[in-house]
Image (tube, helix red, strand yellow):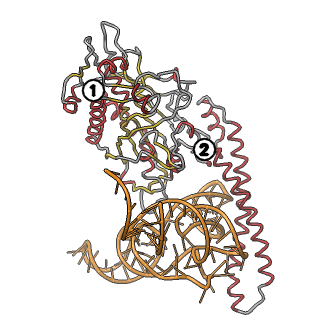
Amino acid sequence: MLDIKRIRTSPDSVKQAMKNRNKNMDEVIDRILAIDEERRALSTQADEMKAEQNKASKEIPALKAAGQDTGPIMARMKELSELVKGCDGKLAELEAAQQELLYSIPNVPHETVPIGKDDTENKEIRKYGTPTPFPYDPKAHWDIGAALGILDPEAAAKVTGARFHFYRGLGARLERSIFNFYLDTHTQHGYTEIFPPFMANRASMTGTGQLPKFEEDMFKLEGLDYFLIPTAEVPVTNLHRDEILDHANLPIKYCAYSACFRAEAGSAGRDTRGLIRQHQFNKVELVKFADPEKSYDELETLTADAERVLQLLELPYRVVALSSGDLGFSSAKTYDIEVWMPSYNRYLEISSCSNFEDFQARRAAIRFKKDIKDKAQLVHTLNGSGVAVGRTVAAILENYQNPDGSVTVPKVLRPYMGCDVIR
RNA sequence: GGAGAUGUCGCCUAGUUGGUCGAGGGCGCGCGACUGGAAAUCGCGUAGGGGUCAAAAGCUCCUCGAGAGUUCGAAUCUCUCCAUCUCCGCCA
């Protein structure tokens, strides 16, 4: 959520920022400003009446004690009470309307974000390694997985439905090995490991920005106001909701494994085969709570921390800065890490590292104090996949495939796998 | 899932025949005095958010788990929800 004061003081720059996102929100912003003005005027009116009420309320007991006639003052109080009720009712409506509109406005992109209409204008920042060379047509990971008997989408379709997978044998072990390796690596670099709940309530989902706008993309539990988490970002960021953190503890760095659940209605047809777009997948997430002055440095190191695991796995990848038109709703700046996928003959997103600045912190009321005497101010929240596990399996199967159909196990995973090759 | 109890300012606690209580005390914390320094002691201060204001100060409004209600007026009464504790049931 953007600061209403920012919209009030510089509406034109916010409008332009939305246009850079390829969204025209001029009308919404103008409506917010109109409501805001009406709301504040009414609020001042109500406050004045409440002040009169409070004052009289303190005088009444004294008058009664003195045995004076309270008839006239009571009549006035009765009148005030009605007026205040009317004002407060109208105010609540205005506040709700304003809130709803504010919730619909995405974050303002950072000045370093390349301006562009969509993902075709993302900017490549750096590359690691070179695309794995194959003297033959590399097979797709779903064919490799099926041939090795380690991936079974058909059984999952029977047991649950489309876009789920069974992993079997060394496939299941590979999945487990990867997220253990990720957690071990990140905890060695200062991240505290968290194992979160896989369901979150509405307040949490609103805090990180999944709600109210994207409710149809979420799995909601029937009869409860709980949602299956789409990412560990939700529970881990909300861990500090409504808290005032100690500046001395910043940055707070967490890593968390979780299953992630996404309904993603309407994305059928593309990337539907294999492990790329599933309703349930595993991910290790990195989350930071940072001093606003340092959050962009923290974004660089967070991205580097995510890259590290791919380097250790010796998977070729590149890092791209998302253009303003491709940026996620809550993000001010995002780097995508894309791993090389031989059967696609292109790079594919495996991690998304973002600085949300105070956009989530404002919704979730996550603040800090530099000194006990200071006013609490909003922290900056950041997160990034460190990294997606299912897509890592896909990348390993494809990049490490051998002509005989077997798959070499990356060196760093061998202690976890207990073998050198999957065959 | 059933029954009972509880939910106040970082922590503990006072306050429930409704009014001068947004709230007293203790601890903790901050600043100061004392000290060579410290402890002890003493003094002062110590929640968050909104409005007004160029800004600060000041003034003012809201928040006693959350929300709704009764009332001129609610921490105190009523209702709903949430959380915690105890006992019972069920269960990996």
Quadrant that contains the C terminus of chain A: top left
Disc 2 residue type (three-letter) = Tyr
Location of residue B53 by image quarter: bottom right
The CA span between labels 2 and 1 is 40 Å
Q: Which residue is mark 1?
A: A313
Q: Of helix, strand and loop, which one carries label 2? A: helix
In the image: residue A123, left or right of residue A12 = left
Q: In the rendered image of this protein, does residue A273 appear above or below residue A241? A: above
Q: Residue at x 33, y 26 (%)?
A: A393
Q: Residue at x 35, y 42 (%)?
A: A256
Circle 1: is it few (<14), some (14-19), or many (20+) Cα within 10 Å? some
Q: Closest to the observer: B75 or A74? A: B75
Residue A336 in the image, given as x and y percentages of width and height = 43, 29
Q: Is residue A358 visible?
A: no
Residue A262 in the image, given as x and y percentages of width and height = 48, 35
Residue A313 in the image, given as x and y percentages of width and height = 27, 26
Location of residue A406 by image quarter: top left
Q: Of helix, strand and loop, which one carries label 1? A: loop
In the image: residue A156, left or right of residue A17 = left
Residue A57 in the image, given as x and y percentages of width and height = 69, 78
Q: Chain of mark 2?
A: A
Q: Closest to the observer: B30 or B89? A: B89
Q: In the rendered image of this protein, does residue B3 appear above or below residue A372? A: below
Q: In the rendered image of this protein, does residue A315 appear above or below residue A305? A: above
Sequence order check, earlier mark of 2 and 1:
2
Q: Which residue is mark 2?
A: A103
The single residue placed furthest to the bottom in the displayed view is A67
Q: Chain of mark 1?
A: A
Disc 1 residue type (three-letter) = Leu
Quadrant that contains the N terminus of chain A: top right
